[in-house]
Amino acid sequence: MIQFKINKCPDEDYIGEIKTNKNLIYIGSNLTSDVYLPDKKIKTNHLFIEIAENKLLAHSHADVEYFWVNGKRSKNFKFLNIGDKIKIGESEIEIIIFANTEVTDKRNALNAATDVLISSKQEYLPIVQNIQKEL
C-alpha cells in the first residue's frame, strides 16, 4: 500500500491524495499509467515507485535522465522515506505512508478458506475440496 499526495501539477484537478494497494505503481503522462499526470515535461512512464523488502524505491524509466527528491537530483533510483517530495516535470509528489501489501492469489485464498472449514467441520467441506482440486 502506497499513499501519497500530488502537491503540484499543471492541471490543478489532479492535486490531492492517492492511495493504492499496489506494491508497484507507474507515474507518467500515459493515460494507462497508474498515476496519470498531464504534464508536458513528463514522459509516458516517467517514474516507477515500488515497495521492495519493506523499503520504498523510486526509479526512473530508461529514457529519463534524472528526477528530484527533496530538491536533490537523483539519477536512476533512490530509496524514499515518508515525507519525501519527488519532483518530475512541473509536478510534485509527497510520500505520506507505505506498507508492503501481501499479494494473495485465488489458490491461497481458497486454501485459507478450506482450513477454516476443516476446523469448523462444515457440511460444505467436500464441495470446497472439489473446487480446490480444479484450480
Image: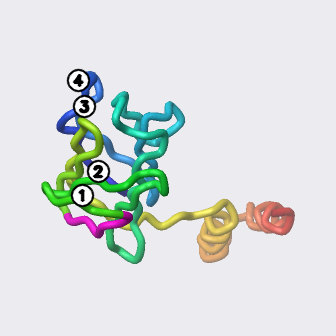
Q: Secondary structure at mark 4?
A: helix
Dot 4 surroundings within 10 Å: few (below 14), some, or many (20 or more)?
few
Res 50 visible = yes
Vertical placement of 55 versus 74: above or below? below
Numbered mark located on residue 97 in the image = 1
- Whether residues under marks 3 and 4 lie with C-beta atoms below 8 angstroms apart, the answer is yes
Q: CA distance from mark 2 to mark 3?
A: 17 Å
Q: Earlier in the sequence, mark 2 or mark 3?
A: 2
User: Residue flagged by tag 1: what amino acid is it?
Assistant: Ile
User: Residue flagged by tag 2: what amino acid is it?
Assistant: Gln
Labels 2, 3: front one: 3
Q: Secondary structure at mark 3?
A: loop
Q: Which residues are magenta?
A: 76-81
What residue is disc 2 on?
A: 3
User: Residue flagged by tag 4: what amino acid is it?
Assistant: Glu
Q: CA distance from mark 3 to mark 4?
A: 6 Å
Closest to the observer, 92 or 6: 92
What residue is disc 3 on?
A: 9
Q: Secondary structure at mark 1?
A: strand
Dot 1 surroundings within 10 Å: few (below 14), some, or many (20 or more)?
some
What residue is disc 4 on?
A: 12
